[in-house]
Amino acid sequence: MADRDELREAIEVRTKALASLPHDPSALAQATPGGIGWSNETLLRNRMVDMFVHEQDLRGAVGAPGGYDGRAGALVVGGFLSALPYVVAKRLKAEPGTELEVELTGGVTRTIRVEVGEDGRGRLHDDASPQPTARVSMAADTFLMLVSGREALRPLSVTWTGDSSLVGDLLAEIAVTP
């Protein structure tokens, strides 16, 4: 019973805190991890990511996969997909003209393409490429595990065609959370 009381109290405290947020989502958040200068919008988006990723940690631990068929799964996975241009262009230092296609299946089904432009910047496209440098396919839960820096406690299923070095580098550098 004490656990329920503790949960009720926590919900009440957080509800009051959320109700007191400024109406302007771009306003500077009052309390952030490490005092980072985030807006309220960024703070709440990052908390949603934390909650979803930790939910997946728990689901994995108890053997109850799921949760990707809702809005939170689509938003979190989509947010992580938007980090791939940075990973490919800056971390991997892929050459201009490089195109990486990523196909996600299972729960969140999506195909995106990262293209490195002549300016060396990565750009995200919401389509496939007829002849990408490399194609990578994996389940959305595998993608989340990799981008959130989780060590695989089970075998991962990733398939690819094309430039094996690019794919290997991507899998080694894909984690974008601290």
Image: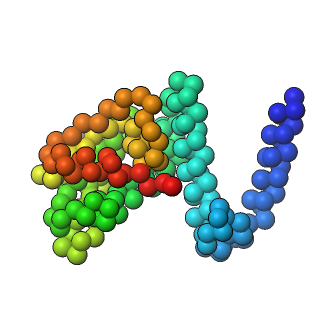
Q: Residue at x 84, y 40 (%)?
A: 6
Q: Residue at x 58, y 49 (%)?
A: 50
Q: Residue 119: percent from the left, percent from the top?
A: 22, 75
Q: Residue 115: percent from the left, percent from the top?
A: 23, 62
Q: Residue 140: percent from the left, percent from the top?
A: 40, 40
In this rendering, position of residue 144 left or right of residue 63 = left
Q: Residue at x 12, y 52 (%)?
A: 131
Q: To which quarter of the image does residue 139 belong? A: top left
In this rendering, position of residue 10 left or right of residue 54 = right
Q: Is residue 172 above or below residue 5?
A: below
Q: Is residue 90 above or below residue 151?
A: below
Q: Residue at x 47, y 48 (%)?
A: 148
Coloring applied to the structure: rainbow
Q: Quadrant of the N terminus?
A: top right
Q: To which quarter of the image does residue 86 belong? A: bottom left
In this rendering, position of residue 114 left or right of residue 15 = left
Q: Nearer the viewer, residue 167 or 5?
A: 167
Can residue 33 be seen? yes
Can residue 123 be seen? no
Taking the view exactly as shown, the residue that stands out farthest to the top is 63
Q: Is residue 21 above or below residue 12?
A: below
Q: Residue 95: percent from the left, percent from the top?
A: 18, 65
| Count of numbered tags | 0
In this rendering, position of residue 28 left or right of residue 142 = right
